[in-house]
Structure formats: structure tokens, C-alpha cells
Image: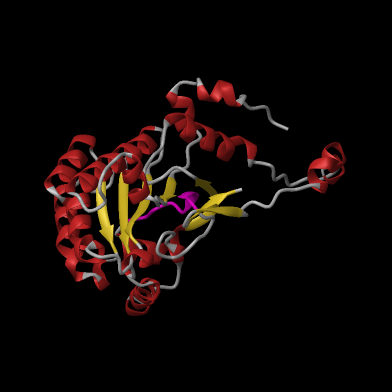
């Protein structure tokens, strides 16, 4: 078995060592922005909440790009949000998203950081098409850091759009479909960095982009993320999960060295309710 650094060595390594093993394409799920705001003493109905959340989002994305990720897909709108009946939430949702991802402050950040930024999924959300146009006009075309926002009001719409494009353009391969939907070639995602419950859905994880998708569900709220957590996840991704080998001679027998672990295994995904929220147990 090839040797690799210890976790402590990796946590202290130069950032170039982290970039060398980072996933190229990451899908980022970020739930719990309202809970995070409450913990920070902010009202969910205030403009301060929206401004503060956008700052957190930019910091989180910048952290991932700085550590070697080249493409990030993240969803500011998913089906569950669109179906909420919380007073004032639905009425303000699209305007807040439009400002948060494509307002003057956001565009200034993208320009300073040199990101390419695109908004996908507006075919069924015409209210956000202007934001999509602004992003394409204001941010660079391709580069080392590409941010892809996806918005989905209904999961069936997401599937319908893929099928429509493939049928209209007579597409027969995934590579062609990715090029048609996103306007460029994008390497399949090999990491899903989710939050909360361990679930996957098409409004968070674009199905065309699923590669050998290694999944991590952090329990940070909203866009909370720190360098140690990023490095710990990338360490697991780059080293600990690389257990496959073509020649499995004598491999299975090594289970005897860890017999007690396999005889009393945990179940990842079982949780508990903390008030109205799920939390892993």
C-alpha cells in the first residue's frame, strides 16, 4: 500500500499540497441559513440576514477555490424552498436570490476574485433570467474558478429541461449534453459537500455531473466552513477512501485484524430530532 501523509501533516502542509489532491468539481449543498442567522442574532426577515448570508457564501466559495477546486455547483433555490408557505418568505425569495447572486455587490466580488459565474435553471423561472444575463455579461468566460448557481422550483422541471435539450439537439452522449446545458466541458463532480440529512436530489445534485461522487455531509449551518474542515475532508477524499485495488489477493483476509469493528458497525445516517430539526446520532 502506498504511503501518504498523516492527517496532522496534511493539516499543516503548504496549500499547494492540498491543491494537488483537491477535487476538480464539487457540488456544494448549504442548508440552514436561517438557523445560522438566528444563532448570530439576526432576524430572518431583515435585510441584514440577506447581506450577512451573502458574505458567508462568498467566503465559503472563496475558501474552496483557494484550496484547488475549479468548478463549484451550488443551489440558492431548491424545490422545498419554493413550496414553503412561511409568511413573507416566498414573496421575497426570488428578489433576494437575484440580488444575492447577481446584485452590484456580488458582481464586484466576482470581478475582484476573477470568477466565471453562471446561473442555470431559469428556463422555468423567468423572474431570474435577468440575473442570469447580468452574470454572463459581467463575469469572465471560463478560467480556473467557475461558479455555477442552479435554481429549481420543481424537480420535474429539471428533468424536463434536460430531456428537451437532448431531444431538440439530438444529443446522444453525456459529454454532448453537458456542453449543451452549460456551454462548456465540465469534468464530472467527484465530491458532494452537503449538509444536514444525508440525502441526494436532482435540485441539489445535477445528475449529468455525477462522477465517482464521494459524499460528505457536514453539520455546519448555512455556509459555515473553515480551513481545517476543508483540509480534513480533502484528506479523507484523497487518501483514506482510495482503498480499491485491481489485485485483491489476500485483501479480504485482513478483515480479521479489525473483527470487532465489522461485527459492531455503525449505520451512517441514523439521527435524532432536536426540536423540529434532524441531527446525526
Tell me what residue is drawn at x 53 percent, y 33 percent: 232
- Where on the picture, by quarter, is residue 168? bottom left
Residue 115 magenta: no
How is colour applied across the structure in the image? secondary structure
Asked if residue 18 lies left or right of residue 60, the reply is right
What's drawn in magenta, residue-wise?
184-196
Q: Residue furthest left?
A: 104
Residue 193 magenta: yes
Tell me what residue is drawn at x 61 percent, y 48 percent: 281
Which quarter of the image is occupied by the N terminus?
top right
Is 100 placed above or below 125 here?
A: above
Residue nearest the observer in this picture, 275 or 4: 275
Q: Position of residue 169 (x, y in %)?
A: 33, 75
Residue nearest the observer in this picture, 132 or 29: 29
Asked if residue 33 lies left or right of residue 1, the reply is left
Q: Residue furthest front?
A: 275
Amino acid at each position: 500500500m502506498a504511503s501518504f501523509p498523516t492527517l496532522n501533516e496534511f493539516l499543516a502542509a503548504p496549500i499547494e499540497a492540498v491543491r494537488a489532491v483537491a477535487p476538480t468539481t464539487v457540488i456544494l449543498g448549504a442548508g440552514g441559513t436561517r438557523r445560522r442567522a438566528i444563532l448570530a442574532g439576526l432576524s430572518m426577515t431583515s435585510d441584514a440576514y440577506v447581506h450577512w448570508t451573502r458574505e458567508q457564501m462568498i467566503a465559503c466559495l472563496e475558501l474552496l477555490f483557494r484550496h484547488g477546486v475549479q468548478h463549484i455547483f451550488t443551489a440558492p433555490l431548491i424545490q422545498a424552498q419554493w413550496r414553503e408557505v412561511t409568511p413573507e418568505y416566498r414573496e421575497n425569495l426570488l428578489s433576494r436570490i437575484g440580488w444575492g447572486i447577481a446584485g452590484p455587490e456580488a458582481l464586484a466580488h466576482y470581478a475582484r476574485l476573477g470568477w466565471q459565474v453562471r446561473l442555470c435553471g431559469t428556463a422555468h423561472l423567468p423572474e431570474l433570467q435577468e440575473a442570469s444575463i447580468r452574470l454572463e455579461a459581467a463575469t469572465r468566460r471560463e478560467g480556473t474558478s467557475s461558479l455555477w448557481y442552479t435554481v429549481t422550483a420543481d424537480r420535474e422541471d429539471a428533468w424536463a429541461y434536460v430531456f428537451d435539450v437532448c431531444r431538440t439537439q439530438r444529443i446522444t452522449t453525456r459529454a454532448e449534453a453537458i456542453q449543451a446545458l452549460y456551454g462548456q466541458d465540465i469534468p464530472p463532480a467527484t465530491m458532494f459537500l452537503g449538509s444536514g440529512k444525508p440525502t441526494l436530489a436532482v435540485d441539489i445534485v445535477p445528475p449529468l455531473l455525477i462522477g465517482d461522487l464521494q459524499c460528505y455531509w457536514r453539520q455546519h449551518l448555512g455556509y459555515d466552513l473553515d480551513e481545517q474542515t476543508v483540509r480534513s475532508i480533502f484528506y479523507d477524499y484523497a487518501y483514506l477512501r482510495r482503498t480499491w485495488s485491481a489485485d485483491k489477493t489476500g485483501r479480504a483476509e485482513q478483515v480479521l485484524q479489525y473483527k470487532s469493528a465489522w461485527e459492531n458497525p455503525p449505520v451512517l445516517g441514523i439521527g435524532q430530532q432536536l426540536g423540529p430539526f434532524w441531527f446525526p446520532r
